[in-house]
Amino acid sequence: MERSICFYFQVHQPHRLRLYRFFDIGREDYYYDDFANKTILKRVAEKCYLPANELMLELIKRYKGSFKVTYSISGTVLEQFKEYAPEVIESFRELAKTGSVEFLAETYAHSLSSLTSAKEFKEQVLMHSNAIESLFGVKPKVFRNTELIYSDVVGAAVAEMGYTAMLTEGAKHILGWKSPNYLYTNAINPRLKLMLKNFRLSDDIAFRFSDRSWENWPLTSDKYAAWLANILSKEEIVNLFMDYETFGEHQGASTGIFEFMRNLPGMILSRGDIKFDTPSGICDRHQPVAPLHVPFPISWADEERDTSAWLGNELQNEAFAKLYALEDDVKNTNDPKLLSDFRRLQQSDHFYYMCTKFFSDGAVHKYFNPYDTPYEAFINYMNVLSDFNLRIQGGTILAEDNSSANKRSTKRVRK
């Protein structure tokens, strides 16, 4: 029996919105906090992307290609790499040259379009695939949706686009007694193979690695390798899916996370019967055991493993509905700047910031949120959306009176 481990990393940074007040509507159509975006991107590049890529390249060379890794890199972070840290793209190109790295397709804007617009979903996937091929010389064969969102319908749409496999969450409420450590197929189109995240082992690294209150702290390479070997003595695949920012950002270098990763492959490969592989390689060497029925969307977020982190309250649903209601009008303008803004406003992060789930997963939401409250996130986003809507309608500033008494009268009118 083949035994495989897949290390997959998500690489993403959003275009964060600047503070956009009510009085900015109709006056200012640049929505982004360039200072925050540049500062955060360069910090994470220094702490995570560059040293982590250097480590992965070192491991691939040390083990002569037997160590393999997989990435999906959102279009939004690629844009920021080009502008603020082009050396990160070069480091990914060096990894691509090894032949031991697979790059996956996803939505260009890290969006939730698969849940509402088949047309926009397909356009973004094609846009992202072209960007990856242009930058790294490889055309993606395997798909991962934003936040690992998946359902039977989404999977069938991905299969129609020609992808052979897709990554998603090994959600307990979907699997029941089944194990995530096998290949499955889409329930509608069995040509699409499904790789499921082993969330317990993934989260041991991503979330619990530096938690001194965790019963298994400290997590050492030999301990983790033993866990993996024990599972793979009975089952076929362990999929370890996590944010790339785990290395150096979420888990700082001082925690020992880089040394943990540096030592782990040797401890696995020395056993001789376990291989590291990419999704394409695993799908070539393993056979699916059954179709997986997923009637409602799942994701890798929170305890619920559903879409409630982004679409779980009235604020999020209102913002989401109003944004996508503009799709046809945006595309009918044939305006590249409007289309670019439309896609940046689709980034899932904007809706995540509006989440009100401050109970079981509140600490996680707070860590990733630049706003003090979800209501501030909603108001800021809707102010931006109001101005964006004016621009779509052909608005322009008619007159401007800088006196405080007349600021409210400044508005856009149709050309």
Image (cartoon, rainbow, N blue to C red):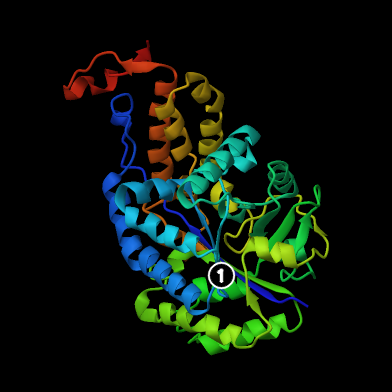
User: Which corner quadrant holds the C terminus?
Assistant: top left
Residue 131 locus on image (x, y percent): 49, 44
Rendered residue at 83%/62% (across/down) = 290
Rendered residue at 67%/74% (across/down) = 4
> Which image quadrant is residue 287 in?
bottom right
> Which image quadrant is residue 203 in?
bottom right
Q: Is residue 36 left or right of residue 199?
A: left
Rendered residue at 36%/43% (across/down) = 17
Please say whether residue 171 is visible from this viewpoint.
no
Q: Is residue 194 left or right of residue 399?
A: right
Please say whether residue 412 is visible from this viewpoint.
yes
Q: Residue 189 versus residue 137: which sits nearer the camera?
A: 137
Extreme residue toward the right, this view: 290
Residue 104 locus on image (x, y percent): 57, 54
Extreme residue toward the left, this view: 403
Which residue is the site of mark 1?
68
Residue 401 locus on image (x, y percent): 19, 18
Residue type for callout 1: Lys
Q: Is residue 77 above or below residue 365?
A: above
Q: Quick one: SS at disc 1? A: loop
Residue 403 locus on image (x, y percent): 16, 22
Q: Is residue 306 above or below residue 177?
A: above
Q: Is residue 46 left or right of residue 234?
A: left
User: Which corner quadrant holds the N terminus?
Assistant: bottom right
Q: Give neighbour class at mark 1: few <14, some 14-19, many 20+ (Cα, 10 Å).
A: many
Rendered residue at 46%/80% (across/down) = 262
